[in-house]
Image (cartoon, rainbow, N blue to C red):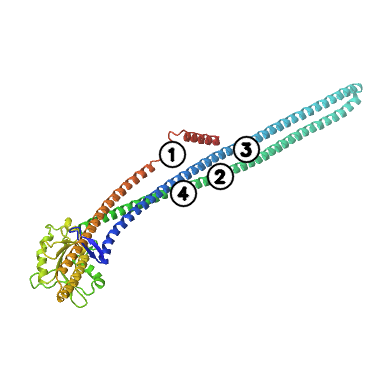
Amino acid sequence: MNEIICPHCHKAFKIDEAGYADILKQVHDKEFEKQLAERLELAEQDKLKAVALAEAKITGELQKAASVKDSEIQKLKADLEAGAVAQKLAVSEALGAVEKERDALASALEKITQEKESAAQLAEAKLLNELQKAAAAKDAELQELKARLDASEVAQKLAVSQALSIVEKDRDALATALEKAKQEQATAAQLAEAKRVNDLQSAAAIKDAEIQSLQAKLDASEVAQQLALTQALNVVEKERDELKTGLERSMLEKQLAETALKDKYETQLKDRDDAIERLKDLKAKLSTKMVGETLEQHCEIEFNRLRATAFPLAYFEKDNDARTGSKGDYIFRDLDEAGTEIVSIMFEMKNENDETATKKKNEDFLKELDKDRNEKGCEYAVLVSLLEPDNELYNAGIVDVFHRYPKMYVVRPQFFIPIITLLRNAAMKSLQYKSELALVKSQNIDITNFENQLDSFKDAFGKNYDLAARRFKTAIDEIDKSIDHLQKTKDALLGADRNLRLANDKAQDVTIKKLTRGNPTMAAKFAELKHDAASEAE
């Protein structure tokens, strides 16, 4: 048994372990929810920091990879330009060698032609000279023969005739030989010219074949270089596309993460709002177990949960007897093992919707409840009410209305079981006192002692009632503090969402140019990189 002091009358009363555990559970749950909310907030902050760090790391890696790929692309372009220059130079050198060889062959052909012409002219001049010498010799012999002929006319005439015939014959032979030599010389010159032309054509064909081969090799080299360039460009474009795809995927993942975080924050905010509304409803109605239930169903369920353990011999049923024109909601009667009635209570449950235009008061039902109690022969009357949710008198817990009607209480739903326990325990004490009083009367003992004990019991009961009321007030204050804390948590989460959005906007606006603006060290580094790139290109 535990003592509870009523905050209204400052009387102490005792409650059983079930009622006391229920009150402690309400307080412990609020403290547990508070600690849980604080830990969740710390966990969310750590997660936000981790996400921001991961985003910064991914951004740096992507920028670094993009810089490396740009450098590789520039290097490949420089290599391709150098290869094209080298190819053009090789072609120019090959064409120069071919043209030089062609010019040499043409010079040699022209020299041979000149030499052939000179040789022909020299041979012709030599032949004419020999013919002239032969003719001069013959003329000299003819003169000699004419002289001899003059000496001897007859003999000479015959000899002259013979000599003339011989000379003419020799002359004809010489003329024939000269003509034959000229024809042979012309034939030899033609053969030499044909051979020279044939040699020149063969040399030209060989050179043309070599030129065609070099041209084919040059075309093949250009095709190979073009193919290599195309393959290199394809590799670079593929890497660029992969980087672009990776960047887009990273941006998409970032957007998804931001969306997930936003949804999570919105869910948390909604949960906080729901928790605040539940706490506000708890403050107004002081019941956490009436979702989807009526007040009567709630009270019946709560009693049935403890009937087997706390009230095994109790009667708790709806009052269906309306013969007198009115009836209460429930009647509670508890009996001892001998079948003697310990306590009887008439219950009335009152609730109304928030949208109800005309609001009822608890005092409007007290007279009818007292009438039902008397008609049904109940010792106590209890009004379980959710009316007047803003009235601090009733929100304090158990309210004693003895000043209006005897043995009557007004309670909130969470004190339904505690009031039954208190009244039953008090009745059991009274039953004990009554038994003792009967025994004392039978033994002719003065009743004054009983009255003193009864007064002591009343004082003890009042103290327990006062203690319970004060603790209940403390629980209500803790609920108000929890509501304020959850509202602050909501405001903090909204502020965090705004700061996260601003941080994301600032991160999106960050560029290399802005980061390095006004930094002489970075400017010098970029200038050095440009100089190195220009040197490599040269």
Residue 46 % position (x, y):
39, 50
From the viewer's perspective, is the residue at label 2 or at label 4 nearer? Answer: 4
Residue tagged 1: 512
Expressed as whole percent of the image width and height from the top left, the position of residue 489 reads 30, 50
Q: Position of residue 204 (x, y in %)?
A: 66, 39
Q: Residues within 10 Å of mark 3 (few under 14, many from 20)?
A: some
Q: Is residue 510 above or below residue 456?
A: above
Residue at mark 3: 94
Say if 187 sits above or below 455 in the image.
above
Say which element carries label 2.
helix
| First in residue order: circle 2 vs circle 4 | 2
Q: Residue furthest left?
A: 325
Compared across the picture, whether 136 is left or right of 400 comes to right
Is disc 2 surrounded by few (<14), some (14 to 19) or many (20+) residues within 10 Å? few
Question: Of label 1 and label 2, which has the lower sequence position?
Answer: 2
Dot 4 alpha-carbon crowd within 10 angstroms: few under 14, some 14 to 19, many 20 or more: few
Q: Are marks 1 and 4 in contact (CB under 8 Å)?
A: no
Badge 1 amino acid:
Ile
The residue sitting at the bottom extreme is 338
Label 1 secondary element: helix
Q: Closer to the camera, 63 or 4?
A: 4
Q: Amino acid at mark 2?
A: Val
Say whether residue 286 is visible. no
Circle 4 residue: 242
Horizontal side, residue 48 vs residue 302: left or right: right
Q: Could you tell me if residue 404 is visible in this image?
A: yes
